[in-house]
């Protein structure tokens, strides 16, 4: 998720929050966006877009496929692609960098490199989910569910 055009933000920036793009962005990152022609978006790019039903906040997700007139997007940590297909009416912007507190900008991967990063993040997500299942089953087997709950609460 992103908050665009906040009074304290510069033009073409958005404040990121959420977990769908974790490992790419962290909540509170300031994203630098650029308006580009719709035809220039390609799979692997990260787009900030603003569907009409979303209110003032927008969505920041990676483009995983494109048709002539719409883009299919998905958060790197989401289980499935977004239902909403991005069209030019959603005013998509290309996320080109995230700005650090000192003003330095880190570029965001796009295109083929972006798709590679997407696949790596998907593998990491699958491993995390699998490891979590093993830990929960092992805890259940040995009656350690309460200890596991205490550990989770301590790390929140």
Image: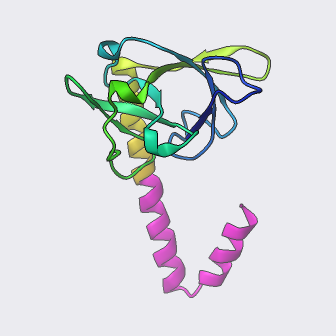
Q: Is residue 91 left or right of residue 23?
A: left
The residue at the point 40 percent across, 36 percent down is 120
Instruction: Using the image, determine if residue 6 lies above or below residue 135.
Output: above
The residue at the point 45 percent across, 46 percent down is 77
Quarter of the image with the N terminus is top right
Question: Residue 25, located in which quarter of the rendered image?
Answer: top right
Magenta-colored stretch includes residue 155: yes
| Rendering coords of residue 118 (x, y %) | 39, 34
Q: Work out whether residue 136 or residue 4 is closer to the camera in this orientation and state it.
A: 4
Q: Work out whether residue 71 or residue 77 is closer to the camera in this orientation and state it.
A: 71
Q: Would residue 76 be seen by someone viewing this image from the given angle?
A: no
Question: Residue 73, located in which quarter of the rendered image?
Answer: top left
Q: Is residue 82 left or right of residue 13?
A: left
Instruction: Using the image, determine if residue 68 lies above or below residue 51.
Output: above
- Give the residues drawn in magenta, as a range: 127-156
Magenta-colored stretch includes residue 148: yes
């Amino acid at each position: 998720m992103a908050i665009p055009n906040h009074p304290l933000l510069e033009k073409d920036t958005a404040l990121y929050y959420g977990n769908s793009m974790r490992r790419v962005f962290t909540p509170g990152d300031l994203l630098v966006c650029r308006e580009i022609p719709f035809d220039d978006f390609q799979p692997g790019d990260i787009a900030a877009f603003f569907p009409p039903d979303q209110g003032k906040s927008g969505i920041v997700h990676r483009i995983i496929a494109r048709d002539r007139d719409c883009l299919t997007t998905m958060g790197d940590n989401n289980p499935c692609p977004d239902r909403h297909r991005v069209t030019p009416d959603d005013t998509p912007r290309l996320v080109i960098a995230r700005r650090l507190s000192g003003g330095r900008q880190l570029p965001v991967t796009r295109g083929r490199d972006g798709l590679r990063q997407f696949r790596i993040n998907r593998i990491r997500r699958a491993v995390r989910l699998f490891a979590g299942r093993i830990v929960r089953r092992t805890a259940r087997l040995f009656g350690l569910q309460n200890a596991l709950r205490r550990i989770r609460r301590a790390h929140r």
